[in-house]
Image: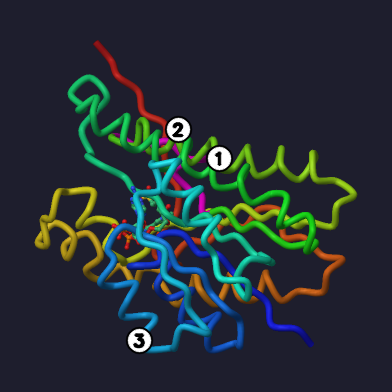
């Protein structure tokens, strides 16, 4: 059986880093992308350049993305799986107090860059009858205070995934939207601008999802028989559930 190749965006931390480990352990080649070059180089050193190809660039930089795709070594140039994982939330303020620059960074990363990577790699994925796993979020389905643009970007990811499936009908390409709830990664450190105490407090006692839980889930999806497509998958910790609806009287 020929060795398969996955491109995993956001491979320097959290879900992406754990997914690199899972797929390399499973015998795949991995293209690992993210901004922090030293972490990517660490993956290459740990696993070897025949297993991991590092691409350090900002995913919002379309020219850098195209250059990285054009420069893939031949063994990595055919792509069987795209894991659109790179993304972030910035801020928890209500919309009326939010920072517009943070909103734009989330849209540029979670929406525009994800769509651009997908558009660029679709021909290769179709050629291989490959798969796309998009990392959405429960925030795309359930509103919460301060979720504003972040949740909006993830609603895009979920619906884009479903629309991609329709357009790819008959190509054999599988598309999945994974929608995790609370997971302990660097996510909250990034969201709070590096507030370790806030991050620790959020996860304390919650038994959140781990990065390797999501990596195992992506591995399971990618290795299902080719006639099956997990279209949407919502995952929460047992200790998290949705309760909403509020009434203001005044
Ligand atoms: P982490 O902060 O641990 O990892 C985020 C990854 O995204 C990093 O590798 C980071 O790499 C990369 N990234 C962010 N911005 C850019 C950029 N401009 N260019 C390239 N890479 C970028 O968070 P998670 O692992 O938790 O997040 C992964 C995905 O999962 C995100 O899309 C997030 O929205 C989603 N998610 C997270 C949940 C959670 O509770 N943790 C729940 C549901 C969904 P670098 O900084 O090196 O560029
Ligand atoms: C991350 C999960 O609930 O913090 O997407 O938005 S949540």
Gap in Å between the C-alphas at discs 3 and 1?
30 Å
Q: Is residue 160 above or below residue 7?
A: above
The residue at 71%/76% (across/down) is 223
SS under mark 3: helix
Which quarter of the rendered picture does the C terminus lie within? top left
Instruction: Look at mark 2 in the image and give the residue it sits on.
Output: 152
Q: Nearer the viewer, residue 129 or 139?
A: 129
Question: In the rendered image, which residue does mark 1 sit on?
Answer: 115
Q: Residue at x 57, y 56 (%)?
A: 178
In this view of the protein, which residue sits in the foreground, 75 or 135?
75
Query: Mark 3 or mark 2: which comes first in sequence?
Result: 3
Bounds of the magenta segment: 135-145
Q: Main secondary structure of the magenta part?
A: loop
Look at the numbered discs 2 and 1 and tell me whether their residues touch, using CB distance below 8 Å: no
The disc label shown at residue 45, or none: 3
Report which quarter residue 32 is drawn in: bottom left
Residue at 34% across, 67% down: 12
In this image, 52 relative to 42: left or right?
A: right
Q: Looking at the picture, how far across and down is residue 187, in whole percent?
A: 29, 57
Tell me if residue 228 comes above or below residue 139 in the rendering: below
For marks 2 and 1, the one nearer the N-term is 1
Q: Secondary structure at mark 1?
A: helix
In depth, the one of 225 and 59 nearer the eye is: 59
The answer to whether the residues at label 3 and label 2 have Cβ atoms under 8 Å apart is: no
Q: Secondary structure at mark 2?
A: helix
Reply yes or no: does residue 207 show up in magenta.
no
- The answer for how far apart the CA atoms under marks 2 and 1 are is 15 Å
Q: Is residue 69 left or right of residue 92?
A: right
């Amino acid at each position: 059986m020929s060795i398969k190749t996955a491109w995993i965006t956001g491979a320097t931390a959290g879900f992406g880093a754990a997914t690199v480990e899972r797929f390399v352990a499973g015998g795949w080649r991995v293209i690992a992308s993210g901004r922090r070059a030293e972490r990517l180089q660490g993956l290459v050193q740990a696993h070897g350049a025949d297993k991991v190809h590092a691409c350090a660039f900002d995913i919002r930089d379309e020219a850098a993305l195209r250059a990285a795709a054009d420069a893939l070594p031949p063994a990595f140039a055919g792509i069987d799986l795209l894991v659109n994982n790179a993304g972030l939330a910035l801020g928890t303020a209500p919309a009326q107090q939010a920072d517009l620059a943070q909103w734009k960074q989330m849209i540029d990363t979670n929406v525009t860059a994800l769509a651009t990577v997908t558009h660029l790699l679709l021909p290769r994925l179709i050629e291989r009858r490959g798969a796309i796993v998009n990392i959405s979020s429960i925030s795309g389905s359930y509103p919460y205070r301060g979720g504003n643009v972040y949740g909006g970007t993830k609603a895009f990811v979920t619906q884009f995934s479903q629309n991609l499936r329709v357009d790819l009908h008959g190509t054999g390409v599988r598309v999945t939207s994974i929608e995790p709830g609370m997971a302990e990664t660097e996510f909250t450190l990034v969201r709070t601008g590096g507030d370790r105490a806030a991050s620790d407090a959020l996860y304390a006692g919650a038994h959140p999802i781990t990065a390797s839980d999501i990596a195992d889930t992506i591995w399971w999806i990618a290795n299902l028989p080719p006639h099956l497509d997990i279209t949407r998958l919502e995952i929460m910790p047992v200790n998290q559930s949705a309760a909403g609806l509020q009434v203001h009287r005044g």
